[in-house]
Amino acid sequence: MESKPPSRDLYVAAMLLSGAGDALGYRKQLWEYCKSGPQIHRELQELGGLQNIAVSLPDWPVSDDTVLHLATGESLATGKLSEELYQELAARYVSAMTDMEGRKSGPTSILGTSQLRPGEPGGYKIPFNPSATGCGAAMRSMCIGLRFPRPSELSLLVAVSVESGKMTHNHPTGYLGSLVAALFTSLSVQRVPLEQWGSILLETLPLALEYLRSTDSDAQRHADEWDYFRQSWERYLSQRGLLQGAGPAVFPSPYGPAERDVEYGRWSLDGWPGRSGHDAPMIAYDALLGARGSWEELCSRSMFHGGDSDSTGVIAGCCWGALYGLTRVPKGNHSQLEYRGRMEAVAASLHMLAWGETTGGL
């Protein structure tokens, strides 16, 4: 069944809260590189709590995550599709790398963009990279779900998320993170119950593999590395009692900041929770399940932990915004956000492209 049109305000909230989640999790490098969730929570209280934080320059810049997410969104906002869109994405990713002072761009994103040749035939493609398992593709792909939100557009969402992800992270663990971030955002827009998202992902992964086999000359190398991502998600969903797409989610007790650091670490590929393409959206999803309608709880779980907290926060914030809007969020958390105007413009453009003139709400 096709979803009803959401209000443009929800698209604006999705973009703004993705940026807020990034900036809060990053805290000008201080919290992204802090390995202790309890320490971050203590420092948060010393700042007067979440309600007291004005996310603005110079202390709360957005990181590379939002700069690259905006590059994705502004590419999609051109209305281009297929090869023209992929060339546009490649060009904007290359350009975005000139805006990385103090934003800690990832080495795989730096390498990948250096290999892109936008404007040349096939210039958006780079070689398979056996070590490109990071979250750099996932953290910039949520808005693909805003552009292609309908169930009938799933094949487009798969193609664009996979191709855009491969532009820097040409390894299944990397670019499938892009697919999950886009898919979960589209499910937010569709109002699909949270408990079903994981099982829908597992049903979507074969479509992505089929797409790879039909478009990539090196498809077997991708197929050989495919299982880690799928098996990681199957384990996680089994742990939460969600493998069949029915809830409620089962959480450990207690499950505070210290316990979450341990749990998130178990899901990680290299010991840095949220650093990889499979577990950045996994932590974001876990936070959405646990937070429900509480922005403060979402931040606690997805942005204030001892891992790659801006990358998990940027994904969680986007989905939460698409679900709940801005009314429950302290105004200071988003009203002075760096690049706020660009985020609002992208949201308006993507809403228009996805839904036309309508602004009917859900």
Image (cartoon, rainbow, N blue to C red):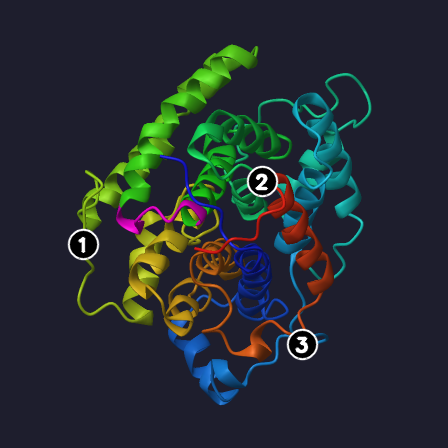
The answer to which image quadrant residue 320 occupies is bottom left
Q: Is residue 236 above or below residue 103?
A: above
Residue 359 position, x and y percent, is 56, 53
Q: Is residue 90 above or below residue 155?
A: below
Which of discs 1 and 3 lies nearer the camera? The answer is 1
- Name the residue carrying label 2: 354
Amino acid under label 1? Pro
**Label drawn at residue 59:** 3
Magenta segment boundaries in residue numbering: 189-195
Residue 148 position, x and y percent, is 53, 36
Asked if residue 94 is among those painted magenta in the image, a careful observer would answer no
Amino acid under label 2? Ala
**Alpha carbon of mark 2 to alpha carbon of mark 1: how far?**
31 Å
| Residue under the image location 63 percent in, 46 percent down | 357
Comes first in the chain, label 1 or label 3: 3
* Label 1 environment density (alpha carbons within 10 Å; few <14, some 14–19, many ≥20): few
**Alpha carbon of mark 1 to alpha carbon of mark 3: how far?**
39 Å
Image side of residue 116 versus residue 40, left or right: right
**Alpha carbon of mark 3 to alpha carbon of mark 2: how far?**
35 Å
* Label 3 environment density (alpha carbons within 10 Å; few <14, some 14–19, many ≥20): few
**Label drawn at residue 282:** none
Residue 168 position, x and y percent, is 63, 34
Q: Is residue 126 above or below residue 139?
A: above
Comes first in the chain, label 3 or label 2: 3
Cβ atoms under marks 3 and 2 closer than 8 Å = no
Residue 312 in view: yes
- Name the residue carrying label 1: 248
SS for callout 3: loop
